[in-house]
Image: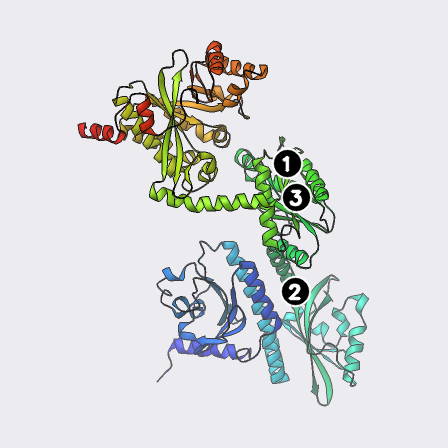
Amino acid sequence: MRPTPSLIVEDARVAALAEYDLVNSAPAPGFTQIVALAARLFEVPIAVVSLIDRDRQVFHAKVGVASCETDREIAICSHTIMQTEALVVLDATLDPRFHDNPFVTGPSQIRFYAGIPLRTPAGHAIGTLCLADTRTRNTFSDADRETLRQLADLTVDRMELRRLEVAQRASQSRFEQIASTSPDGIICADASGRITFWNAAAEQIFGHGSTEAIGQSIDLIVPERMRGGHGGGLHRVANGGKPRLVGKTIELPARHKDGTEFPIELSLSKWQEEGRAAFGSIVRDIRERRANEERLFRLAHLDPLTELPNRSVLRERLDEIATVGRPVSVLMLDLDGFKEVNDSYGHGAGDSVLRVMATRILACVRPIDTVSRLGGDEFVVLLPDIGDPLRAAEVAGTIIAAVAEAVEYDGQALRLSASLGIAMAPSHGNNAGELLGCADLALYQAKSDGRHCHRLFSPVLRHQAQRARVCRDELGRAVERGEFVLFYQPQVRLSDGALVGAEALIRWQHPDRGLLSPAAFIDVLDSSRYAAQVGDWVLRTACIQAEAWRSAGALDFRMGINLCTAQFQRGDLTETVRATLSDTGLPAASLELEITENIVLRQEIELIATLHSLRESGVGIAFDDYGTGYASLSLLKRFPLTRLKIDRSFVTGMLASHHDVTIVRAILQLGLGFGLSVIAEGIETEAEHACLRTEGCQEGQGYLFGKPMPADAFAAGYGLGVDASWALARRLGAA
């Protein structure tokens, strides 16, 4: 029976694998280094140089694998060698080829796999370089594929060296046959250092043809400053001296015919021909490899944009310092206003700013200090042997001042600031994870305190963070179980005390800690994934209640509702509000949405269009706590506001402070000039009430008129006895 073409190809492939003599031999250090580098570059627990024999897969060099081989039938790499490019499986459980593979379903629990064939110069795929992880991945980029390919090229380079070494051991004749077609330079010399063999690859590498090279001294390819040593060494070994280089692979400079120097890799061997010593060398031009290795090193250790040490290097250095008990200060900072630079001027401007800031930070520290970019606009500085908080604070102040200087970009002066957190070893931690975590908490505190400042970690910050984590964990349960409730604070007309509306205020009926005010949870809620969902619940519940009270006789009743940033970020606020008004029957004019400065400053571009759309629907827009922050007067022109709310701090202080009275008058005058209504918050005394009324303030709210209260208490106090759910059911029934 004639063999099938597929069997012929497989026989040739297996024969090609045998030429390397790798299947049953220990891995050379070069292969082990490659898989270790691959595991580190791609942050995977498993990296393997895998050889595919006829019936088995052999793990020649490996990281994260205990076994030495497995059946070829179940090997994912068996699929890889059938491909021309890399095989990438982002989630093996979703791939019909591998979802029931023992490596996926068994103890290995492989989820992510990426492998690339290792091909001989003749094109036979004899194995793979592969990566694996127990975690799935979302993507494996073109840059990742190129890096994997370059690592595979390095692996094949070392395999070729192995093949030639095997051939040398077989026989000199066999060696010369292989050498004539080898992609590596093969040079042979006699005991006196005269060249006796020079293959085509050597001609390509050094520029000398075989006719001009054979018979010349080996010094032909040696830089002038190093000549003489090689020939003498060969003569010494030929006469019985101990060889220094035979059997080793070394890197050294060589000389091209045109006089230029370049690095080569050389393996030297020795044998006897007719009783006389002979020498052979395998030579490889490693300029491209050096460039690739340097690039891979930089990828593994340096941030590509700023060329600062990356996160992994930072953690290694920090662990090394902290483990031996040396003091070290950790400064973590990020750039305030960096997002605005990216949004306004583009990512090119952002990249330029990051490079400038990296240079400035480096100029603020000592040569022994480490400056690292963690990613985005976040940097970390390590100050070894500095355990004094005052010295660390001095460096922090210098960095903050340097960051604050304008950055010139495309004719524009870009200004940013820095917030910085400080942690110190050993007092705050004794490993990288603890110290970076403490510095991050201190950074968060600096940002909360107004930015453009630095803060030192203290244990209370950790306790606050732990409470926030507990709160975040409990929020999901609160949403599922409906633990949030609304209280309502009356808003009145100051001239006669008549009720005009209410502000809906959220409370948390916690099963263990009782009724919680917003101060206990609102910051955590606003930054959680539940913010928009809870905000929508507040909107709908308050609208239902407002329509119920309107049905009870309060026809001109107005409901004020606070919005959160997440509701704007979602992009469908206008549609949500309109749908809620339609479902509940509440007229748009009876709804007033309150925005704060945080929303205005962070979402201005998107916010204006949304607010204009809501205003066109008839919904009122109030600016809460006006005058307490950084919002400019120009927002009164750009934003479709209907009401300004005077913050309680000005109301409380106006009886004793001429400055507070002036601010209140200014806000009232602005409201008059822009055609806006004004309401004062936090009125607690008759004197405050009288003063505001005298100044011309139209409306107010505060404890003088009523604390925030449940809906039933509010209804009882103002004669609104209709239950909200009954009113809504009546309206829906009528429809």
Q: Of the numbered discs in the image, which one, if any, rests on residue 241?
A: none
Q: Earlier in the sequence, mark 1 or mark 3?
A: 3
Q: Do the CB atoms of the residues marked 1 and 2 lie less than 8 Å apart? A: no
Residue 278 to residue 681: above or below? below
Which residue is labeled 3 in the image?
358
Coordinates of residue 95 in the picture (x, y in percent)? 37, 61
Closer to the eye: label 3 or 2: 3
Residue 342 placement (x, y as % from top left): 54, 37
Marks 1, 3: nearer the viewer: 1
Q: Secondary structure at mark 2?
A: loop
Q: Helix, strand or loop at disc 3?
A: helix
**Which mark is on residue 453?**
1
Instruction: Give the residue type at disc 3.
Output: Ala
Q: Quadrant of the N terminus?
A: bottom left
Q: Are marks 3 and 2 in contact (CB under 8 Å)?
A: no
Number of marks present in the image shown = 3
Residue at x 78% of width, y 86% of height: 240
- Given residues 518 and 259, the one toward you in this image is 518
